[in-house]
Amino acid sequence: MSNIYSVSDLTKYIKSLFDRDTKLVSVFIKGELSNFKCHYSGHCYFTLKDAHSQIKALMFKSRAQFLKFQPRDGLKVIVYGQVTVFERDGQYQLYAEQLIPDGIGELSIAFNQLKEKLAAEGLFDESRKRPLQLLPKAVGIVTSPTGAALRDIITVAKRRHPGLPLILYPVQVQGVEAPYQIVQAIQAFNNLKKVDVIIVGRGGGSIEELWAFNDEQVVRAIANSTIPVVSAVGHQTDYTLSDFAADCRAATPSQAAEIVVPDVFELKRYITTLQTMLENNIRTYIKQRRQTVRQLRDSRVFTQPEKLLVDKRQMVDTYVERLGQAVRKIIMTKQQTLKINAEKLAVLNPLDILARGYSLVRTSDGRVVTNYQQVKPGQQLEVILRQGRLNIEVVNTKEEKNGQ
């Protein structure tokens, strides 16, 4: 019975075997991430698996905070760490020190993940980008004071516009402090409002050397700048997230200076050309107007104005004659119409009927008598003749047919 162990003792013994095995103390394991979760404490828990087996794994916050990419389920990785036993659960697991993407660089994954995130937020939209001023009053520069980028910008700027003020905000362009300093520089220029455009850049380098310009805070500072920003990071083949967020991207610092700084000598030549074109256009315009004035001066209006009056008088006479004819024609037509209407009226005149021997008989109240039954014997009537009137009294009434 002396060989009976407690669960804790057995677990500690097995753990000691794991801890003494040099292969398990420092091991690289390749597999696929599954059930990856980042606890609020900062510790990361996940499962590393392949087609046949799986192992639980843990990465403490002290190591996880240095990850440059966001681990996701399904991502193939190589994990460096130690395999040991978790005594409480009696389960062996992997304590990860490093997490390396399998086949793809860690920084490349981090670059693509952050690019997708910021693009989804609209930080790279063309609608956010602002045009650069043609003639800036001053140019802000955010770069290393000792780098070749600054010398290139100054050389190009002085050649193109010797009098343009260049204001440098010196920063580190690589290393741990670089992102913070770049953000501070951009914000300082925005607060001071002394420049019309900001060049943010450095010379070329590896992805690690350029990484400060892929930092999320730097990219957001560029996108949120109220002053237009020109990104000039690296050489033509090098792209950073700052390039996508900037209002304009230059392949090199020298090209950034050419984009931002106007060539005053070329502008002077252009202005001289415009001046010459303007003078020529004015001369041509004046020449054309003079020609028009000469044509007007030589026209009949000025040389023989009396002839114009003669023509007008003749036209007036013609119109007066036409008007008279028209009026006479109208009068004749109206007279003819009046004559016809007068004849019609004469035919209908009741006095002409009375002249032929007829008379009009009315009662005292003005009613015309047309039937013997309308009157009674002894009733007073009025007889209207062609000339004069008669007041009579009815003696007798009788009926007659057809005048009989």
Image: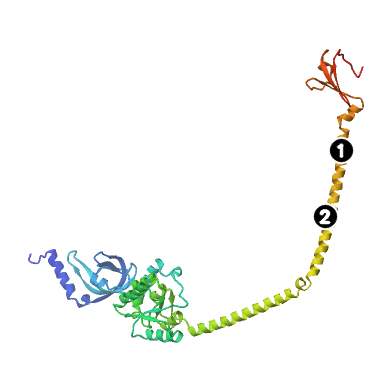
- Name the mark on residue 342: 1
The reply, left or right, for residue 161 in relation to residue 290 is left
The picture quadrant where one finds residue 196 is bottom left
Could you tell me the amino acid type at mark 1?
Ala
Image quadrant containing the N terminus: bottom left
The picture quadrant where one finds residue 37 is bottom left
Q: Which residue is mark 2?
A: 323
Residue 308 seen in the figure: yes
Could you tell me the amino acid type at mark 2?
Leu
Q: Residue at x 67, y 79 (%)?
A: 287
Question: Mark 1 or mark 2, which has the lower sequence index?
Answer: 2
Helix or strand or loop: what does disc 1 sit on? helix
Q: Residue at x 33, y 84 (%)?
A: 145
Query: Given the current orientation, which residue lies at the most extreme left position?
Result: 2
323 over 71 or under it: above or below: above
The location of residue 300, given as percent across then percent down, is 77, 72
